[in-house]
Image (spheres, grey):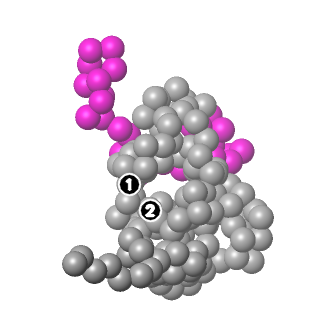
Amino acid sequence: MLLYFGEAKAPPPPTLLRSTNQSNHAHRSARTTNIFIINLRLILVSGKTKEFLFSPSDSAGDIAQHVFDNWPDDWCQEAVSKAEILRLIYQGRFLHSNVTLGALGLPFGKTTVMHLVPRETLPEPNSQDQRQKSKGGNSSCCSASCCIL
């Protein structure tokens, strides 16, 4: 819970969050004064974008479900069959469905850009050894064996 002017304020409930389009401009203007709002600009593979308002307590899974339930009309060609295949990419990394916006440390009241892609499963993370080998490095301290006499 965050403190603001000595008074405890809770983030807005996710059910009040809406897509920021022309029809709810008044709703958006009223909501942007709240310091606990995170504005997400979601970009599809096609390059189409849309902005949505979310709470720091909303997870990537909550966001995917909200976007699926409120799929923008101008995204009709990119529509998916279920929310579970929508994945968010932030700073080049896929977000797991339980990661919250607050955990990412996103700034309140500012726009953050993420990609939204349809994908059944997340890619497996590379281990440290695999990354070292792919860079041509060696995971041990030296390539020759040492012997103490």
Start-end of magenta stretch: 1-28
x then y, percent, for residue 64: 49, 66
21 sits left or right of 34 in the view: right
- The residue tagged 1 is 100
Query: In the rendered image, is residue 124 in sight?
Result: yes
Residue 20 drawn above or below residue 126? above
Regarding residue 126, the answer to whether it shows in the image is no
Count of numbered labels shown in the rendering:
2
Q: How far apart are marks 1 and 2 (CA)?
A: 6 Å
The C terminus appears in which quarter of the rendering?
bottom left
Q: Earlier in the sequence, mark 1 or mark 2?
A: 2
* Image point (47%, 29%), residue name: 34
**Contact check, label 1 and label 2, Cβ < 8 Å:** yes
Q: Where is residue 79 in the image (x, y as percent from the top left)?
A: 65, 77
In front: 39, or 149? 149
Dot 1 amino acid type:
Thr
The numbered mark at residue 60 is 2
Q: Which residue is drawn at 68% across and 48% down?
A: 21
Is label 2 in a helix, a strand or a loop? Answer: helix
